[in-house]
Amino acid sequence: MIAITETIALAPEELEFHFILGSGPGGQNVNKVNSAAQLRFDVRRSPSLDVAVKARLERLAGARLTREGVVVITARRFRSQERNRADALARLAALIEKASVPPPIRRPSAPSRAEKEQRLRAKSRRARIKHLRGRPEESE
């Protein structure tokens, strides 16, 4: 089991790794060795996540999510296959950890009486300034 949070752990069978040619550091080796790691994780079929976490994860994944509900993370920062594999796994873990935190409940609040009065005073001042910009009134 791969521990993500205290309550979430993924089975290794849920993760699918493919290794592909990667750009980036590696010199002449970069064109010959499949060092970039591509991690695929099927969010919708995962028994490790509850429904709310799955929904938040799909929203957070953005462009990394396929139509089938698979998160695809490509790691090619490092020269070695093993470090790229660990990087992809760490990025998935961070994404799942972020999705596991429910958003805070918004409690709407009304402005206080003092705030309302202050707003009205400011509006009156502004209106007076604008009124003074006009033509002077003719007084007889």
Image (spheres, grey):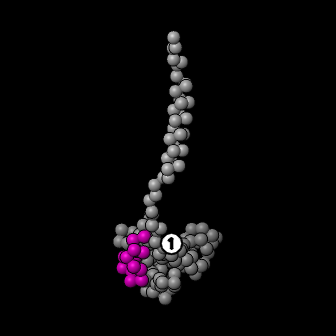
Position of residue 4 in the picture relative to residue 28 (left or right): left
Query: Looking at the image, which residue sits at the far top?
Result: 140
Establish if 119 lies above or below 52: above
In front of the other: 91 or 76:
91
State how many labels appear. Answer: 1
Looking at the image, which residue is at 42% across and 66% down?
A: 59
Residue 54 counted in the magenta span:
yes
Corner quadrant of residue 31:
bottom right
Establish if 105 lies above or below 133: below
Establish if 80 lies above or below 112: below
Looking at the image, which residue is at 36% across and 68% down?
A: 67
In front of the other: 82 or 47:
47
Looking at the image, which residue is at 46% across and 58% down?
A: 109
Q: Is residue 23 visible?
A: yes
In front of the other: 93 or 112:
112
Please state which amino acid type lies under the numbered disc 1: Lys
Circle 1 sits in a helix, a strand or a loop, which is it? helix
Q: Is residue 33 visible?
A: no
Residue 1 counted in the magenta span:
no
Residue 14 coordinates in the image, percent (x, y): 43, 83
The residues colored magenta run: 43-56
Q: Which residue is mark 1?
A: 98
